[in-house]
Image (cartoon, rainbow, N blue to C red):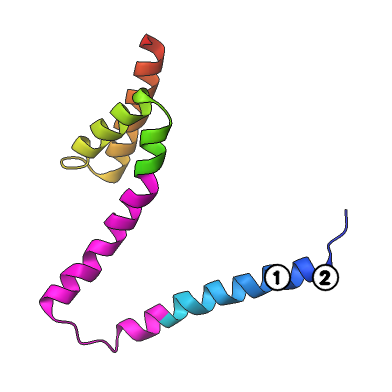
Amino acid sequence: MSLDPINLAAFLGMALVTYLTRIAGLALVGRLNLTPRAQAAFDAIPPAVLIAVIAPSALATGWIETVAALVSGLAATRLPLLGVVAVGVATVVGLRALF
């Protein structure tokens, strides 16, 4: 197996751009003076992105995974992350065993 120089350059370029965007975000966040409302909006971005990634997968794979996602969402209101993951996995395993 050989590595094409064009592919290598593309990989390295993508890695560099990804790294620079992450560093730029960290460098700029300290310079922003946000109002409390803007800060609340920025704080809502990570859970919104997480839901945007999880919801299509949970809704498109089948009813068992959809139920497990809903149960995990309810568990997330009371349990830490590891507990939520355990509840979600147990729900999928249990429902698949039953049905």
Q: Residue furthest left?
A: 36
Q: In the image, what residue occupies the spot 35% across and 51% down?
A: 52
The label shown at residue 69 is none
Badge 2 crowding class, 10 Å Cα cut-off, few under 14, some 14 to 19, many 20 or more, is few
Q: Position of residue 34 (x, y in %)?
A: 18, 82
Q: Is 7 one of the magenta-colored residues? A: no
Q: Position of residue 35 (x, y in %)?
A: 13, 81
Using residue 39 as the reference point, say whether residue 94 is left or right of it: right
The label shown at residue 10 is 1
* Of 25 and 60, the residue lying toward us: 60
Using residue 77 as the reference point, say whether residue 11 is left or right of it: right
Using residue 13 as the reference point, say whether residue 58 is left or right of it: left
Report helix, strand or loop for mark 2: helix
The label shown at residue 5 is 2
Q: Residue furthest top?
A: 98
Asked which quadrant contains residue 6, the reply is bottom right
Report helix, strand or loop for mark 1: helix
Q: Position of residue 36 (x, y in %)?
A: 11, 76
- Type of amino acid under label 1: Ala
* Magenta residues, start to end: 25-54
